[in-house]
Amino acid sequence: MPDCGDVKALYSRRALLEAGLGIAGAIALCRSATALVAAPADAHGSTERRFFNASESRTVEAIVAQIIPTDETPGAREMGVARFIDHALAGFLAPLAGPFRAGLADFDTQYRSRNPAAEEFASLAPVRQVEWLRQVERTPFFASLQQLTVLGALTMPQYGGNRDGLGWQLIGFADEHAFAPPFGYYDRDYPGFGAEEPLR
Amino acid sequence: MTGRRYHDSTVVDFVVVGSGVAGGVIARELAIGGFSTVVLEQGPRLTAADFEHDELKYWFLAGITNDTARSPQTFRADPSAAAIPTGMRPALWYARTVGGSSTHFTANYWRFHEIDFVERSRLGSIAGTGFEDWPITYAELEPYYTKVDWDIGVSGLAGASPFDPPRSRPYPMPPLPVKSSGVLLERGARKLGLHPFPAPMAINSQSYRGRAPCIHCGFCHGFACEVQAKSSTLFNMIPEAEATGRCEVRANSYVVRIDTNARGRATGVAYFDANGRERFQKARAVVVSANGAETPRLLLASTSSQHPDGLANSSGLVGKYLMFNYAARVSAVFEHELNEFKSVQVTRVVHDFYDADPKRGFYGGGGIDARIGPQPAVWAQRLSTEGPAWGAAFKARLREFPRSMTLLCHGTSLPIATNSVSLDPTLRDAWGRSALRVTYKDHPDDLANARFLQDRAVEIMDAAGAQRVIRVPVREQNFSMHLLGTCRMGDNPGTSVTDRYHRTHDVRNLFLCDGSSLVTSGRGQPTMTIQALAFRAADHIARFARAGDI
């Protein structure tokens, strides 16, 4: 099988079970085909939240901003990743909404129980956020959020993330309909099959 | 293109279940041969204009593939355990549209080698497996491989690989332009004394039979072609079948049962039409090319008092011997840009490790090709299995996309009876049918072979001057888009489901041809061989029909 066993992480049975969905829930994991069609509308038109409440939104925004941090170039925050996740969980990924919300609540509960006197996670200094995320980076919730962050950064802007193609800019992907050779550095001076001498 | 329309009650010569890799070929050949033919396809009919560069839709949201919301699957590695629903991703993935998986394939089109058909005789049996010779040889299939090259449309360079089996004609089109990944594979492999060669691809390198050449957009694997440059049956076999005026392709028609009469002959098939209404298409003979998952499922679901264990299942082997092909991965980063998101997936291949070698201590062999994987999001998700998954280090890794490539090592899978497709005892699909249950656990030799090939790939990338080489861990598989072996061909009715002509041993006018027909797994890239089998099957089926022997 080529190429895709590892993209399953987001949807893995184990992750869902650990997120409390259970077998019955996994059976009910039925996304509606119409939601897919409906989702892209109004992707960047408003800042309205569709799924998260204000507190959830701040936490998710803070976590994804550490997954792809902003440095001299834009990160997940500027790419609109949190909005992508918000739209997705209200739409085409609605079956994951319950477990995701539960995972987020767990994240919050754990954080507060270990840091009773501290401010909320989203208000921490970035270096403190990173410290805490290192504690939880192996949880299914974090893994799901990591995979969703990638989707939010790199799929088509019509789904609410990858604002202005910033994700594609980061990785150096050109969204063009057609290309012509040479495609890269190494095929530029290719002498033809069989013409290149073995390297010594 | 509008073909002929038949009424359900018309007894057509053939009903073909599935319009994909094999079904499209068989329908075209039978229609050209003068037979009235109805093709029933569970998915919709789309055109090139419907396809988009939308990774989320095609890779994550079942844009043109089987959708677990309507067609759930269960999976287990241990045949004694209960299988558990897979969630949004199916275990067995296939395109569900007219043209089937030929719409979204990578289009890697090497032929199986002569050894693939006689490996059991050469190497001996392997305990605990159903390792067998095929009932046919490469020589018998060669004319049909050539027919695939020319009728389907394959680009390549004949004679470029010293390991290639004999061929009667060159390729109809020259190879596609090499990509940087191909140059680097070629450079590294030659330095090691290996024999890289231009990849045979079912993608037009120039205009061919009315279809445009590739525009190098990069969206092949998992995507359908927007300019018809990919040689999908949707763009060649299906319209050619319809042009005969003898073939009707009925989309959104989900076949749920094959009926038989008191004499044990198939009378036609029951199916749900686009409106969810159950209908019945009568036919003199039935050809099932629904893929290696759905073909056995349909037979197992076609029970009757005469066939309590499913149709054509006197051997008990329908659904058994499921094979995936192991694909081990090595990622590499180079100093300069490759821009692998451009153009077709694969431009160079190495077959030096194709043959099994008992000295290695395990069965197996494989081919290694250069590519990057589908497109940005899938590539980036995969990074989390290769190293840092968040933070500055992850962002740095994301920036390496243009300088990255992958060597994919396509290996063997042994046929094991417990690896199977069966009917789930409780879970139902949206049509009320028993869901697909998948049982699969890689043979230890398959995993050892995957690691062996991965070691060779690491050597090649090192020799090519990679700055960094990353070995993606080889783990047991629970997902595949290669659906092979589940209704194997053979001469012995006790140990196979169909004979060498794809006729089921049990039902004289029922034929099966698709990935399910394979006896061994080859080394990946099965589509070329499935289509060669389909051209050959159609020849024989037409011969039987003319002789009144169906």
Image (cartoon, coloured by chain):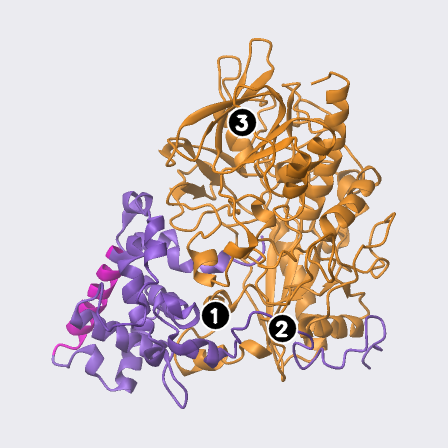
Chain colours: A purple, B orange
Instruction: Give the percent coordinates (x, y) of residue B77.
Output: 47, 44
Give, as a three-letter code, the residue at label 3.
Leu
Q: Quadrant of residue B118?
A: top right
Q: Secondary structure at mark 1?
A: helix
Cα gap from disc 1 to disc 3, whole angstroms: 40 Å
Residue at figure coordinates x 74%, y 16% from the top left:
B548
**What amino acid is labelled 1 in the image?**
Ala
- On residue B299, the disc is 3
Q: Quadrant of residue B81?
A: top left
Residue closer to the observer: B126 or B343: B343
Q: Residues within 10 Å of mark 2 (few under 14, many from 20)?
A: some
| Residue type for callout 2 | Phe
Q: Residue furthest top?
A: B262
Give, as a single range, the part of the protein colored magenta. Answer: A98-116
Q: Magenta stretch: dominant SS?
A: helix
Q: In the picture provided, is B335 more to the left or to the right than B254?
A: right
Q: Which residue is mark 2?
A: A179
Chain letter of mark 2 equals A
Q: Which residue is mark 1?
A: B380
The answer to whether B297 is drawn above or below residue B68 in the figure is above
Residue at coordinates 22% horizontally, 64% vertically from top-left?
A50
Q: Is B293 placed left or right of B493 in the picture?
A: left
Residue B37 x/y as whole percent: 63, 29
Chain to which mark 3 belongs: B
Q: CA distance from mark 3 to mark 2?
A: 45 Å
Residue ID at (70%, 47%): B528
Q: CA distance from mark 2 to mark 1?
A: 22 Å
Secondary structure, mark 2, is loop
B210 and B473: which one is in front?
B210
Let me know if residue B138 appears in the view: no
